[in-house]
Amino acid sequence: MPGRRSRRGSSGTGHHSQRRIRTRTSRAELLFSVSHVERLLREGHYARHLTSSAPVFLAAIIQYLTATVLQLAGNEAQRSGCRRITPELVDMAIHNNALISVFFEGVIVSLVAPGWQ
């Protein structure tokens, strides 16, 4: 029949607009997976109830701490003339920073690094 449109609803352009599925990780602009953090929180039974924003905040905090530690370890590598970040440099970077050393007080990153008291 003349004047009858197809069911696809073509508007003359021939392209159908698709809804793109965006993950919570991409919506929060993070690199650490929000879904993975949520699964670990639920399986760990840390709380009875878990809000939808809790894994997003925790993933952001983990990403921030990781970036900070790697930046400090990269600075240590440059100071010592190394081209790679080793576990010893990560350990030195953590323990040479006053704020982060309090957070990682009982953590041993490398068994080769000297004992920090």
Image: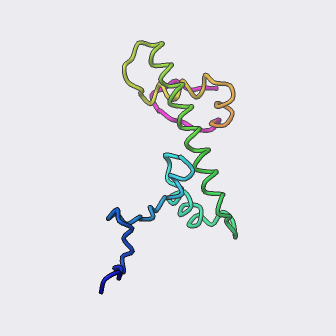
* Horizontal relation, residue 54 to residue 4: left or right: right
> Quadrant of the rendered structure where residue 112 is?
top left
Residue at figure coordinates x 47%, y 32% from the top left: 110
Residue extending furthest toward the bottom: 1
Residue at figure coordinates x 62%, y 38% from the top left: 106
Name the foreground residue: 111 vs 61. Answer: 61
> Quadrant of the rendered structure where residue 42 is?
bottom right
Q: Residue 116: say if magenta.
A: yes
Give the percent coordinates (x, y) of residue 48: 69, 70
Give the percent coordinates (x, y) of residue 98: 68, 25
Q: What stretch is highlighted in magenta?
A: 105-117
Name the foreground residue: 35 vs 109. Answer: 35
Residue at figure coordinates x 57%, y 44% from the top left: 62
Image height check: is 97 above or below 18? Answer: above
Residue extending furthest toward the left: 1
Question: The N terminus appears in which quarter of the rendering?
Answer: bottom left
Question: How many numbered marks, from 0 up?
Answer: 0
Image height check: is 43 above or below 88? Answer: below
Image height check: is 3 above or below 26? Answer: below
Image height check: is 2 above or below 29? Answer: below
Give the percent coordinates (x, y) of residue 117: 64, 26
Residue at figure coordinates x 62%, y 51% from the top left: 58
